[in-house]
Amino acid sequence: MPNIDFFQFFRYTLGTIATIYATVLTLQSLWSWVVWLSGQDKYISLVRRYVIVHGLRLRFKAFWGDVLISVLLCVVFFILWYAHGEMREMFRAYRLAKGLG
């Protein structure tokens, strides 16, 4: 019988499906905004200019706290990912040392 870890299979499958789903939804949303904002109506052009002006006036100082939190969360994610790989190797070595497979 092959040595299959069903938790790993479930985790990778769920991660792949969730990533594809989030990407498709994000692209659909962005495309709908582009289509809506590219309209020729007088009010749509007003909204388009409003969005452009606010995008240009955006102050990045106000978002540095959020950027810092996002970077720290990414660091924690990669540390946990590394630790998970190390634990998997440790368990594999333990199983080999005990002759369990």
Image (tube, helix red, strand yellow):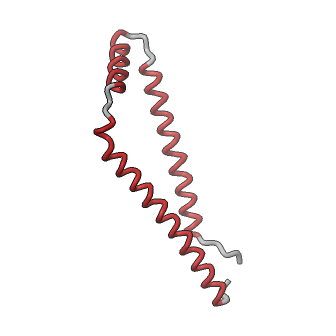
Q: Is residue 33 left or right of residue 13?
A: left
The quadrant in which the N terminus is found is bottom right
Q: Position of residue 98 (x, y in %)?
A: 63, 90
Q: Nearer the viewer, residue 70 or 48?
A: 70
Give percent across and percent down for residue 65.
31, 47
Q: Compared with residue 92, is residue 37 higher up or lower down, i.e. above or below?
A: above
Q: Residue furthest front?
A: 61
Viewer-side residue, 92 vs 39: 92
Number of numbered discs overlaid on the protein picture: 0
Left or right, 44 with respect to 13, comes to left
Outermost residue, bottom side = 98
Image x and y of residue 83, in percent = 50, 69
Q: Residue at the location (36% across, 27% down)?
A: 55
Residue placed at 53% from the left, 57% from the top? 14
**Residue located 45% across and 33% down the image:** 29
Compared with 81, 87 (above or below) is below
Q: Residue at x 57, y 67 (%)?
A: 8
On the rendered structure, is 86 left or right of 45? right
Q: Quadrant of the C terminus?
A: bottom right
Q: Quadrant of residue 86?
A: bottom right
| Residue at far left of view | 62
Q: Measured from the top left, where is residue 60 in percent x and y?
A: 33, 36
Please say if 72 is above or below 44: below
Extreme residue in the right direction = 1
Quarter of the view holding residue 57: top left
